[in-house]
């Protein structure tokens, strides 16, 4: 298995404003918050390097965003102001569980969530719809084995993230 590396696109955090709620202030740049999906209380602290540029009360980002997601930086990356003290849900989250490559090891697509294929490869999309998504997904382990087998038959390489 490969190690997942976040691309800092921010997409996973752009809908978290519905679930990450600040419930109290413990001082400047220190909060009490809850991640409602995980039912996890956490104590975020704005990282020192962001304290001059980030204020929960003065942000101009959409309310759907996690309250600690900063607007994109000059490199186009979205950063978490409380990354070091983020809840375990966020630290464990992987937006992509598999990447798929063709026989020449060129990127062909990726699997997000439990079974959503993101790809521009028409052949891969056809295999996905005809051979993979027709297999019952109620047993995720068996479904993954079927997916690996069907993709290997068609000369695709699957990289799973741990």
Image (tube, rainbow, N blue to C red):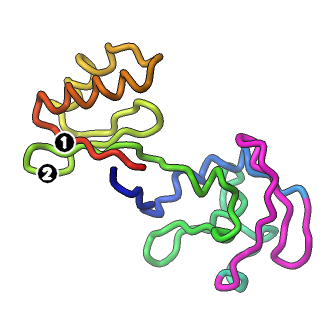
Where does label 2 land, which residue? Answer: 105
Q: Secondary structure at mark 1?
A: strand
User: x and y percent of residue 46 in the render?
Assistant: 73, 75
Vertical position of residue 125 compared to residue 49: above or below = above
Where does label 1 land, which residue? Answer: 157
Q: How many marks?
A: 2
User: Quadrant location of residue 111?
Assistant: top left
Name the one closer to the observer, 2 or 47: 2
Instruction: Judge left or right: residue 2 versus residue 149.
Output: right
Q: Are marks 1 and 2 in contact (CB under 8 Å)?
A: yes
State the residue at coordinates (13%, 51%).
105
User: Quadrant location of residue 160?
Assistant: top left
State the residue at coordinates (82%, 57%).
33
Instruction: Judge left or right: residue 96 versus residue 21.
Output: left
| Outermost left residue | 104
Q: Secondary structure at mark 2?
A: loop
Residue 127 drawn in magenta: no
Cα–Cα gap, marks 1 and 2:
7 Å
Report the magenta residues as a range.
24-49
Vertical position of residue 89 compared to residue 57: above or below = above
User: Quadrant location of residue 7?
Assistant: bottom left
Please rate how many residues cluster around mark 1, counting C-alpha atoms within 10 Å: few if below 14, some from 14 to 19, many from 20: many
User: x and y percent of residue 84 in the render?
Assistant: 65, 71
User: x and y percent of residue 138 in the render?
Assistant: 47, 16
The tag earlier along the polypeptide, 1 or 2, is: 2
Residue 25 drawn in magenta: yes
Name the one closer to the observer, 55 or 162: 162
Vertical position of residue 56 compared to residue 37: above or below = below
């Amino acid at each position: 298995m490969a190690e997942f590396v976040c691309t800092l696109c921010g997409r996973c955090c752009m809908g978290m404003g519905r679930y990450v709620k600040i419930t109290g202030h413990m001082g400047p740049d220190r909060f009490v918050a809850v991640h409602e999906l995980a039912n996890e209380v956490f104590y975020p602290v704005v990282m020192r390097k962001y304290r001059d540029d980030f204020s929960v009360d003065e942000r101009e980002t959409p309310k759907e965003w996690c309250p600690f997601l900063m607007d994109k930086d000059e490199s186009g990356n979205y950063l978490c102001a409380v990354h070091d003290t983020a809840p375990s849900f966020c630290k464990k989250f992987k937006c992509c569980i598999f990447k798929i490559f063709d026989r020449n090891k060129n990127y062909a697509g990726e699997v997000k969530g439990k079974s959503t294929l993101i790809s521009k490869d028409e052949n891969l999309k056809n295999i996905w719809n005809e051979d993979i998504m027709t297999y019952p997904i109620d047993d995720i382990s068996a479904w993954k084995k079927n997916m690996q087998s069907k993709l290997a038959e068609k000369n695709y390489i699957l990289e799973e993230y741990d």
